[in-house]
Amino acid sequence: MYKGLLSFLFNSLVIKMVGLMMEHEPLLKTIRERRTIRRYKTDAVAMEKLQMLIEAARWAPSAGNLQPWKFLLITDKGMLNKVKMVCPGWIKEAPALVMICIDSKRETDWSYIDVGAALQNVLLCAHSLGLGCCPIGSFVVQNLIELLELPDHLKLVLLILVGYPDEELLPPPRLSLDELIFKRVGK
């Protein structure tokens, strides 16, 4: 009797999990397929597409719904070249650049986490639009502040290279769920 009940419960759980996975498969597929892209085609990225990325970012959660972020969008080749001059390194061939700042007028202890949530939305939206991105956290902040004449209340925290991918990358290895979940409490 118990064996039949356990079998029934197990099968019900499996069916429920499969149903949930199928329901959310498009999102999970996008998450699994997104890669950090470092090589880009020379094709220009339309400002409208960059604005779509920011539309996705603005729906990210933030502490107290303060939305502490501000964005700077660059597609102008002259300005991109100037940015490359003051911040050499990864900023090479990308035809567009998104910069994320924290607005000190709306900053909290959680603002960097908020920016991370906005970044993930940008990356997933970009992938769904056929764009590739590479977030960069290491750059010469003061050089960019001066070049872009950023106001004092904006703290530049992240750059995102954006363009059409000129490379195809395989998924990197990931830890299994059992390796990631150290404890389960409840059903």
Image: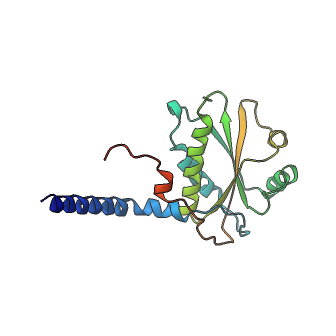
| Side (left or right) of 170 relative to 94 | left
| Side (left or right) of 18 relative to 114 | left
Quarter of the image for residue 102 reads: top right
Residue 158 percent location from the top left of the image: 70, 45
Q: Is residue 97 above or below residue 65?
A: below
Residue sticking out furthest to the top: 105
Residue 50 percent location from the top left of the image: 62, 54
Of residues 22 and 159, the one nearer the viewer is: 22
Residue sticking out furthest to the front: 2
Residue 65 percent location from the top left of the image: 51, 33
Q: Is residue 45 above or below residue 114?
A: below
Q: Is residue 39 above or below residue 140?
A: below
Residue 60 percent location from the top left of the image: 52, 43
Query: What's the residue at 78%, 57% (across, down)?
Result: 90
| Side (left or right) of 57 relative to 160 | left
| Side (left or right) of 95 relative to 29 | right
Query: What's the residue at 60%, 44% (across, down)?
Result: 116
Q: What count of labels does the image hold?
A: 0
The quadrant of the rendering that contains the N terminus is: bottom left
Q: Is residue 33 above or below residue 47?
A: below
